[in-house]
Image: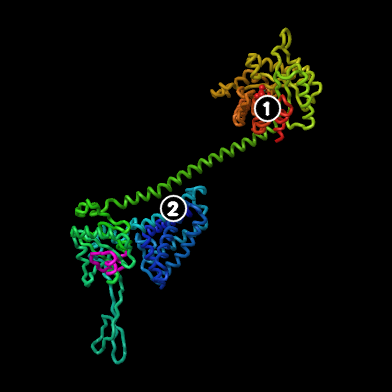
Amino acid sequence: MRKLVVNLCRLLLAVVFVFSGFVKAIDPLGTQYKIEDYLEALHLAGVVPDSLTLIFSVVLSAVEFCLGIFLLLAVRRKFTSFSVVSIMAVMTPLTLWLVIANPVSDCGCFGDAVVLTNMQTFLKNVLLLAAAIVVARWPKDMFRFVSDSTEWIAINYSALFILLTSLWCLYDLPLFDFRPYHVGADIKKGMEIPEGAPQPKFETTFILEKDGEKREFSIDDYPDSTWTFVDSRTVMTEEGYVPPVHDFSITTADGDDITDQVLGDTSYVFLLVAPYLEHADDSRLDLINEVCEYATQHGYPFLGLTSSGERAVARWRDMTGAEYDFCFTDGTTLKTVIRSNPGLVLLKNGTVIRKWSHNNLPVIEEAQAALPLEQMTIGSLPQDSVPRKLSQIMLWFVLPLVLLSFADRMWMWSKWVRNKEKKLSVITNIKKTKKRDMRKKIVAGNWKMNMNLQDGIALAKELNETLKADKPNCGVVICTPFIHLASIAQFLDQDIIGLGAENCADKEKGAFTGEVSAEMVKSTGAQYVILGHSERREYYKETPEILKEKVLLAQKNGLKVIFCIGESLAEREAGKQNEVVKAELEGSVFNLSEEDFRKIVIAYEPIWAIGTGKTATAEQAEEIHAYIRSIIAEKYGQAVADDTTILYGGSCKASNAPELFAKPDIDGGLIGGASLKCADFKGIIDAWKK
Ligand code: PEP
C-alpha cells in the first residue's frame, strides 16, 4: 500500500515537473520575461543583466524537466526526491506570497500553456509539496525503470535533449506556441468580446463639501446642490471578460490607429516585429530587405512594428537602409507576438499565416520572386505542424528512453538469471568439492613398455626416497611392466606408494603362453592393476567381454582395478563421448555388485589426449567426469558415485595438473610419459598440495 502511494505521488510530481519544465524550456524568452516580471515586483528591475536572466531561464526549465524525468525513471532516487522536496519547500511559501501580495497576476509556472491564478498555483503547490514529502520519505519505494549502471545515459541524455531543445527554440521560435498570436490565430477574433460576456463593474465614490465638512457619497445617495463637489474615485469592483488579445494596436508616427486597417487587409501583410529596435539583431538585414522588396513588388504592405522611439527608428533606417514604414505598438505586446527581436510575421485577413525568427527568415529564390504568395508554400498555413512536432519529440526523446529502459530491464533480467545460475553452480561446486574431499585422491603412473629392470628399480627407489622425505597429499601408485614388480615390491614403502601391473590375463591359469595371471601379479606383492587401457583395447583387441573377465579375475585375486575408459578423436568430434564411456562401463564393470564396484578406480582417458600433448581442457574433463559420476549414480546410487575415484589421464603434466585437479569431479590422474621421471611425477603429485 505504501509503495503504491509513493509511486502515485512520484508519478504526479514527474508529470507536473516534466510538463512545466518542457513548456518553459521551449519558450526560453517567455520564461526570461516572467523572471524579469518577478524582479520588477521585487524592485530589482535592471539590476540583473538580461544575459543572466536568460541563462537562469534555460537552466531552471532544464532542471525542472530533468527532475521530472528522473522521477519518472526513478533515477538517483534519494538525490532526486531530496531536490524535488527542496524546490517545493521554496516554491510553496513563494506562491503564498503571490496570493497575499499579488505582485504578478500569473505565476508563469506552466509558461503560456496553462495560465493559473495565484490561488490555484498555491493550492497546486501545497498538493505537490505533500507528494514530494511522501516521495522523499521513502525514495527507495519508487520502482525503477533503469538500473544503476545505465542511469548515467538517461541523466545525460535528458539534460542534453532539453538544453538543445531550449537552444533551438531560442535560435528559432518556440516549438509550440501557446500565445494568442500563434500561427493560425485570427487576431481580430481574439479581440472580440462574445455577446453576453460579463462586463467589468465599477463603483464611483464622490467627495463633496458643505460648511467646511467633507463627506463621501455614492451615486445612489448623491446629496442636493448645497454640497460642493471636491473629488471622485472610481474602482473596479468586478472583473469582466478579458479577450485573449486585449492590448494589440498599431499606431502610425502621426498618431493614427491603423489596427483595423492592418487586420482587415484581405491580402497579405508583412510585419517586421522589433519590440526594442535598440537591441534588435541586424545580422540578417539582407534577407529582411529582400522580403520587403518582394512585398513591395507584389503590393503587399510591409510594416515595421516597434515600441522604440523615433530616434531608434531613424538609427535603424540609417543602419539598414530600411525603406518600410515603422508603426508603434506596446513593447510587451510585441514580445508576446513573436519571440524574436526582430521577427517577421505574415498576416492575411487578420490571421497569422507564418512567423519567422531573424535566424530563420524565408529566402525568396530568384525563380520564385515573380510568384504571388498564394502560389508559394509560405503563403498558406503550414500543415499538421503539432502532430509532426509531437512525433519528432517521440522519435528523438521518448523512443530512445523507452528503448533504453527496455534494454536495461532485459539486461538486468539476464544478469539476474546469470547470477542465479552462477550461484547455483558455485553451490553445486562447493558441495561437489566437499564430497570430493571425502574420496580417495590418487596419482598413478603408467610406465607402459619403458625402462629395463635396472632403470626401473632406480626410478622406483628415487621416488620412494623422495616421497618418504616429502609425504604426498594423495595416494600414489606406480604401475610397471610385470618383470619389475617383484624386485620393486622388495623395497617400496607401500604405505606411501602402491604398486601395480599394467595388465593381467583373462584366464585364471593354464596353457596361455606369454600371459601373466592376476594371481601371479598379486604374488609379486603388487596391489593394483590397470585394465582397459586404450592401447590394449586397440593393439591387442581387448573387447569389453575380455575386460569383464579380467576385472573379475583381478578382483578375485585381491587386486584393485584401475579401469580405463575414453573416446577416440572421431567419437569426440561426433559428440559421442558420453555414449562411448557409458558403453565401456556397462560392458565391463556395471555387472559388478555394489560392494565390488566400490573397489574400482575409474580412469577417464580421452584417446586423442594420450601421449599427444593435447590435454582436454579442465572444463571438458570436468564435464565428462561429472557425467561418468552421474551414470554411476544411476546404476549404484549417489552414495557409491560420491565415493568413486575418477582419475583423468592424457598428457597430464605438473603445469596443467593443478587446474585439472581443482575440478570437483576430478580425483587425480593416470600419468603416462610424465611418470617416467621422478621430478615430473613428483610435480604432478604436488598439485594436490596447492
Ligand atoms: C596413459 O597412457 O595412461 C597416459 C595418460 O599417457 P600420457 O600421460 O603420456 O598422455
Task: Answer yes or no: disc 2 within 8 Å of ligand 1.
Answer: no
**Does the segment drawn in magenta span residue 316?**
yes
Q: Which mark is residue 146?
A: none
Amino acid type, mark 1: Gly
Picture coordinates of residue 445 (x, y %)?
71, 24
Q: Determine whether the residue tagged by mark 1 lies in a helix, strand or loop.
A: strand
- Left or right of 258: which side holds 640? right
Find the magenta span and give its range: 314-335
Q: Quadrant of the C terminus?
A: top right
The local crowd at label 1, few if under 14, some if 14 to 19, many if 20 or more residues have their Cα within 10 Å, is: many
Tell which quarter ligand 1 is in.
top right
Q: CA distance from mark 1 to mark 2?
A: 60 Å
Depth order, front residue of 40/433: 40
- Asked if the residue at label 1 sits under 8 Å from ligand 1, the reply is yes
Q: What residue would you read off at disc 1?
A: 669
Image: 338 above or below 525 = below
Q: Residues within 10 Å of mark 2 (few under 14, many from 20)?
A: many
Occupied quadrant, residue 235? bottom left
Q: How is the image coloured?
A: rainbow
Does 74 appear above or below 489?
below
> In the depicted view, which residue is nearer to us: 251 or 550?
251
- Identify the mark nearer the N-term, 1 or 2: 2
Q: Residue at x 71, y 21 (%)?
A: 447
Residue 485 magenta: no
Residue 264 in picture, x, y percent from top left = 19, 63
Outermost top residue: 511
Relative side of 2 to 331, left or right:
right
Q: Could you tell me if residue 241 is visible in this image? A: no
Q: Position of residue 248 (x, y in %)?
A: 26, 66
Secondary structure type for disc 2: helix
The residue under label 2 is 158
